[in-house]
Image (cartoon, helix red, strand yellow):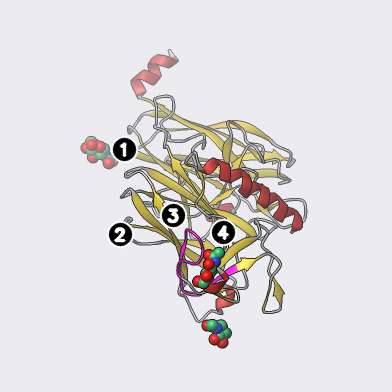
Amino acid sequence: MMLNGALFLLACAAARAAASAGDGPLLNGNFEYSPNRSQMNGTRVTGASAIPYWKVTGFVEYIESGARQGGMVLTVPEGRHAVQLGAGSSIRQQLSVTRGKYYSITFSAARTCAQSERLKVSVVPGDDDVADELPIQTVYTSSGWDSYSWAFKAKQGVVSFIIHHGDDHEEDPACGPIVDCVAMRALNPPRATHNNMLVNGDFEEGPYITPGSPWGVLVPPMDEDDTSPLPGWMVMSYSKVVKYIDSAHFRVPHGARAVELVAGVEVALVQEVATVPGSSCRLQFSVGDAANGCVASPMRVQVATARGSKSVPYNSKGTGGYARDALDFTPDGNSTRVVFYSAGYHTTSDGSGTLCGPVVDDVSLVCVSRPHARRLLR
Ligand SMILES: *[C@@H]1O[C@H](CO)[C@@H](O)[C@H](O)[C@H]1NC(C)=O
Ligand SMILES: *[C@@H]1O[C@H](CO)[C@@H](O)[C@H](O)[C@H]1NC(C)=O
Ligand SMILES: *[C@@H]1O[C@H](CO)[C@@H](O)[C@H](O)[C@H]1NC(C)=O
């Protein structure tokens, strides 16, 4: 825990410098600027604007690392302070953005006592002003802290970003999730080209990863019309995620970013692409491991379209590496869904129980019309 704390302190400090460039923590996004004691009762924040740059509603506590709560020592591995969101409470901050642009938000959260918690994130004004729910259920790191991502399209130049803890059942307010290190990154979604009909097939564009953060960023499940923090891609699941990883802390097959499929068959990474019925298509991709001790012989990635699927084995020693593979198919419709998922469940070999899985990267799709294909073959 101490080690993780030290790591994250560095991570937050490093990130602050990046904020001036537009990408990085929100103002007081790591909650290190404390509320005035006169606007607190014990740990509870009583003034709506007590935490600099934030507005709070409901039962919000300002958490200090090592503090005691209900006989339990609170560990705040990220920095020295964080906020705990009681049932029905929220925190919000106004953001200056560019209308029409896409933004991703990254923040860290830890569960406290409840088995399953959901945080609602939204911007106002936003699409229908309906909040998206992020399941804070499965823990994906050994520290108990996970970084989550989310994204939105800016409808105005100034929006309010809100994290709200669902007003579920009669929960003990001391049991809400703890939130820390809230950051933002403008997304610049790449376009499909004739060399690759998929958008962002190399996963180089995605949510903010705090420099120095060793855990990657979780991309939660989304609805089809949601804005994805991983442009071009949808994460389809009831409550599970994929992990977005960087080459600074993991081995990635190509470029600086990739996706680790950490939740077996319960989550699929999906992209829908316009295709010409009857054309000849080749989907190429890399399958590997992140050098995070995920040992399995083999791991299997399932690759599927409506017109064909393939189980791709990869023997992982957990030390990094990858193999290229391909799937040929002939689309029968104007659009084709390309789907990747892990056929198995894996945990790292260090005994921490950390979920892990195969890495997918460098995905490309090229289709040629049949007459053209015949000409190429002659
Ligand atoms: C805290 O609040 C008290 C009472 O409102 C005020 O006198 C004091 O100046 C404030 N301190 C800071 C550091 O803002
Ligand atoms: C602080 O909270 C305690 C316990 O909930 C309550 O009894 C007390 O009246 C509160 N103090 C103030 C100044 O609101
Ligand atoms: C494909 O698009 C064409 C032209 O837009 C349309 O006529 C046809 O019905 C579509 N086919 C399918 C299977 O959606």
Question: Which residue is labeled 2 in the image?
Answer: 128
Residue 307 percent coordinates (x, y): 42, 40
Under tag 4, what secondary structure? loop
Q: Indicate which disc, 3 or 2, sits on the residue closer to the N terminus.
A: 2
What's the amino acid at mark 1? Asn
Under tag 2, what secondary structure? loop
Whole-angstrom CA distance, mark 4 to mark 3, is 28 Å
Q: Indicate which disc, 4 or 3, sits on the residue closer to the N terminus.
A: 4
Label 1 CB-ligand 3 distance < 8 A: yes
Position of residue 113 relative to residue 11, above or below, is: below
Question: Which residue is labeled 1 in the image?
Answer: 334
Position of residue 250 relative to residue 238, above or below, is: above
What residue span does the magenta drawing correspond to?
Answer: 48-62
Q: Indicate which disc, 2 or 1, sits on the residue closer to the N terminus.
A: 2
Q: Indicate which disc, 1 or 3, sits on the residue closer to the N terminus.
A: 3
Residue 13 percent coordinates (x, y): 62, 47
Task: Tell me if I can see residue 325 in this picture.
Answer: yes
Q: Indicate which disc, 4 or 2, sits on the residue closer to the N terminus.
A: 4
Q: Nearer the viewer, residue 138 or 2?
A: 2
What's the amino acid at mark 3? Met
Q: In this view, does 347 lie to the left or right of 374?
A: right
What's the amino acid at mark 2? Asp
- Please identify, in this view, whether the residue under mark 1 or under mark 4 is nearer the observer: 4
* Mark carried by residue 31: 4
C-beta proximity under 8 Å, tags 4 and 3? no
Question: Which residue is labeled 3 in the image?
Answer: 222
Label 3 CB-ligand 3 distance < 8 A: no
C-beta proximity under 8 Å, tags 2 and 1? no
Q: Does the magenta stretch include residue 53?
A: yes
